[in-house]
Amino acid sequence: MDCSDTVTAEVCKEDDIGDGELCEVMVAGYPVLLVRNKMEFSALGSRCPHYGAPLSKGVLRGHRLRCPWHGSCFNIKTGDIEEYPSLDCLPCFKVTVEDGKVFVTAKKKDLESSLRVKDMSKRCLLNRNTMLLLGGGVAALTCAETLRQEGFTGRIIMATKEKHAPYDKSKLSKEMNLKAEDIYLRKPEFLCAHGIELWTEKEAVSVDFQKQKVHFMDGSSQKYNQLLIATGAHSSFLKVPGADLQNVCHLQTPEDSSKVLELASGKNLVIVGASFVGMEAAAFLSDKAAVISVVEKHEFPFQKTLGPQVGGVVLKMLQSKGVKFYMKKELHELKGKDGKVTEAILASGEKLPADVVVVGIGVTPNSAFLKGTSITKDNSGAILVDLHMQTNIPNVFAGGDVVSFPVALLNGDHSSIHHQQVAEAHGSIAAFNMLKKQKELHTVPFFWTTMLGRSIHYAGCGKGYTDTVLKGSLEQQKFLIFYLKDDFVTAAASLNCDPIVSLIAEVLYLGKKISKEEAEAYDINNIPL
């Protein structure tokens, strides 16, 4: 180690930090996370590489540290990522204890960055094996990176119909003023440096599973040794007259997001659907559009996922910003002039001025190109996989929004879960099994929605829940809701109660059951569970 690049600083007294405590200390003017676990000290980067959350506010269980905001997990011994959505690891620093004083030694360049890219093997041209990954989202990306991290030196191809490198799709409705390059998860140069080929505007149109060959829209084809199908899902289309008018938009790409922002500014915006895309777009555009009208067939936003209690809070939040809601209503027709939408007509006969319409009524798996093949799909078109992300076809794996997979919190029943973190976990697990390193999916779904500067965090899988337990106050917008099925917690959501949902995620990850009685007795002001 070059001593000129290294600093050592006394950060605290040995007795200043107790067992299981997380403490942010300063080393050469940079924040470092100091952890004491079973009387042993560790020092790591203090900010989550995902969105910069302070890890001193996180949840520690054994050697596993979970981010308070979005649930990323890190090993405090190595700094390695153990649970997504963060793609990167934490830097680790040397800790010594002398005469009751705790010292941290670190390289200055490591202190400057709160992330560390996990080591990857290099491409070797002598290795003729080809891993073909269909899709350019996070499932394909984490698969590619995990393959390299686990020593694969052959060819990796990511083929996507998109024109961009993998980007953070969750921001398309949350921060609509960003350029595509601003939300890239990895730049093309990064992929190139690690021998990951990115084929953009390359849409798969068919697969010959016997010959292990994929055919693309441009007439080309590519053979593979192992295939990952991670083609995602697309926004479901309206089935009403006028749905094909100009300025009827779906938020699928960065270009869509920019277009809606431009069209809606100072104009009349109608949003069809009150789920995540619609509500986040309404929140972001609430001070930009002239009038925002939301049309939803259910009584509350998020009713199917977060339930009426959380939905009611969101409804009031957005109403206070002038957003108009037409709940328990259905769109009947869109009318236009000169080919552009001008009006939305509801089944009730009400007419809403519409210069632009945003559609957010659910998604459909991008699996039509597999029609006529023997791959097994469910009624929605989602590809069925097992816990290894293996399909029923040899050497063919699938992950992300295009699949239905066994969910532990649903007692192993298959379901599709459209969260970024889940897709990343799918991609990584697929990579291990493509390399014949047997590994099963073990993850607790975690997602968040952000509106008007407030974030609702959710962990678990509440599908089919039959009961809820509310802690805190909906009116004061500080609450925790447990979702229960058969008297046990399967999911939880919170607002202004971090890091409680991260804690619950960790409890569920460890396979522990939370009973209704425990949920009812839980004190949100006393974190341990």
Image (cartoon, rainbow, N blue to C red):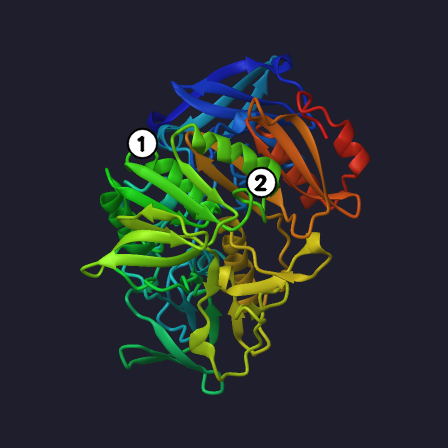
Q: Quadrant of the C terminus?
A: top right
Write down the residue under mark 2. Answer: 458
- Where residue 37 appears, x then y in whole percent? 66, 28
| Label 1 SS | loop
- Which numbered disc flags the more N-terminal residue, 1 or 2? 1
Foreground residue among 372 and 146: 372
* Residue at 49%, 84% in the rendered image: 372
Q: Specify the farthest residue to the front.
A: 349
Per the model, the C-alpha gap separating discs 1 and 2 is 27 Å
Q: Quadrant of residue 194?
A: bottom left
Residue beneath label 1, please? 287
Amino acid under disc 2: Tyr
Image quarter of residue 214: bottom left
Mark 2: few, some, or many residues within 10 Å (few <14, many ≥20)?
many
Q: Amino acid at mark 1?
A: Asp
Say whether residue 312 is left or right of residue 466.
left
Q: Specify the farthest residue to the bottom.
A: 210
Residue at (49% x, 47% y) in the render: 275
Question: Would you place residue 256 above or below residue 430 in this image?
Answer: above
User: Compared to 507, does 44 lie above or below?
Assistant: above
Could you say which disc has been placed on residue 36 in the image?
none
The spot of residue 122 in percent (x, y) is 38, 60
Locate residue 203: give its quadrant: bottom left
Q: Secondary structure at mark 2?
A: strand
**Image location of residue 10, percent across then percent down:** 49, 15
Q: Is residue 78 left or right of residue 28?
A: right
Residue at 29% of width from left, 80% of height from top? Answer: 220
Q: Nearer the viewer, residue 239 or 195?
A: 239
Name the residue nearer the viewer: 105 or 284. Answer: 284
User: Vertical placement of 376 versus 242: above or below?
Assistant: below
Left or right: residue 135 compared with residue 19: left
